[in-house]
Image (cartoon, grey):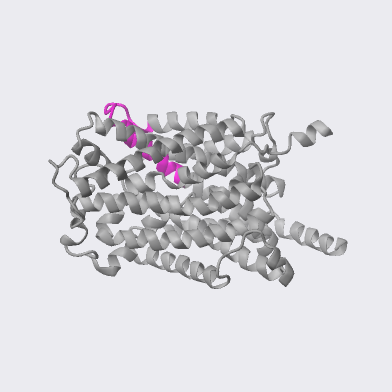
Amino acid sequence: MGKNTQNKELHRGLEERHITLMSLGAAIGVGLFLGSASAIKMAGPGILVGYAFSGLIMFFIMRALGEMAIQKPVAGSFSKYARDYLGPLAGYITGWNYWFLWVVTCMAEITAIGIYMEYWFPAVPRWIWALAALVIMASVNFLAVKAYGELEFWFALIKIITIIAMILIGVGMIIFGLGNGGIATGVKNLWEHGGFFPNGIKGVLLSLQMVMFAYLGIEMIGVTAGEVKNPEKSLARAIDTVFWRILLFYVGALFVIMSIYPWEEIGTKGSPFVLTFEKIGIPGAAGIINFVVLTAALSSCNSGIFSTARMLFNLAEHGEAPKNFGKVTKSGVPGVAVVASAGALLIGVILNYIVPAKVFTWVTSIATFGAIWTWGVILLSQIRYRQTLKQGEVKALKYKMPLFPYTSYLALAFLAFVIGLMGYNPDTRIALVIGPLFLVFLVAVYYIKGFHKRDKIETNVKKRII
């Protein structure tokens, strides 16, 4: 019996440095390197306002998650909180939706890997690289969680060092004229090409879907809660620092890029990161950046397989996914769940084999819809959680949502607004078809399988015990 229970538990092998960099790594993926160029096209320099305000909303969402995760650190956190505070159906939908969202996101990442590898091997078909990336990342996820955390730590570090280097070099160009014959470039480009909002506020609003896609992954901190040593200290610090770091990386990097280059040129002459490194004479800049962007996509895919496997594990524990997904290997990894998620990603490889370029926009918008559902559920769960607490318990909370309840409702309203914008924009409208259809499918399965009857019995038993 002892052996058996031991093997049903996930191991707490993640340290604070692992989870801080994991959530940074998940959020600094293809969104910054591939997605920011299309967002800049829509909004011009005004995109900085979009990133800053959306960043603030993400901070509130993370604080709401942190308030619950520090009191109850469990694997698959927000689907568990949804189950506890919004009911079994909400928990079930949130778990499967989060799995779906990361599978779709990983499809975007493996598509990107195929694109980046073409730089070195133009003759090799993209789908081969997509398949190779999938096999390698699934294998990595079979390592003990500490080894996984270590690898993700170094993956994320490569991206972060590159972005910091680019910001520092850019600041050198702006102030000291580095790589520009000593002539400081200044920041005139931010308003000289049609003003700070060249496409008006409308341009900024239409770019919000891409901006929110860029923040996808920051909630990974919540998924790691069941495998973190000393959750109280680690989670609180990780949540507070991640917000500032992401703001620095996104807003800082884009501020520098748009100061040096006119915004209309960005994305037309290759990656702004490559242009910046080439300008100060670094040989092979394009190859270096291509390598960094490749690790960014691999790292995000790595995080995706990690979190989807944890969600399947959590769903299996509640009998809402095949029992086998709840099995754990000797090293404390939900092995069958990892294989199942990787299997679903094979669809991405097939899509790479048959579909046109439009898929990247579709896939990112569908993933954004899934993310907004998840973030909305986090906020609703936290509002309900607060309502269950007595006054003394609220005072005793170790980590509180600032300015509650106003911030929770403001964040919810903003998420609803972004969904409305996605419906307005023809390119992202597909997400409002596929996303809700998947949710309807989940609800149908829930009732056909009779989960609602079982949940009713469980709730009644709980009430009797209490």
Which residue is depicted at the point 69% across and 29% down? Answer: 330
Image quarter hosting the C terminus: bottom right
Camera sees residue 112:
yes
**Residue 81 position within the rendered picture, expressed as x and y whole percent measured from the top left:** 65, 58
Which residue is depicted at the point 17% across and 39% down? Answer: 179
Q: How many labels does the image show?
A: 0
Q: What stretch is highlighted in magenta?
A: 105-127
Q: Residue 269, located in which quarter of the rendered image?
A: top left
Q: Residue 402, located in which quarter of the rendered image?
A: bottom right
**Residue 462 position within the rendered picture, expressed as x and y whole percent measured from the top left:** 82, 60
274 shown above or below 398: above
Which residue is depicted at the point 48% across and 28% down? Answer: 136
Q: Tell me which secondary structure the magenta stretch mostly adopts.
A: helix
User: On the picture, is 200 further left or further right than 103?
Assistant: left
308 shown above or below 446: above
346 shown above or below 463: above
Camera sees residue 193:
no
Q: Is residue 151 magenta?
A: no
User: On the picture, is 228 further left or further right than 439?
Assistant: right
Image quarter hosting the N terminus: top right
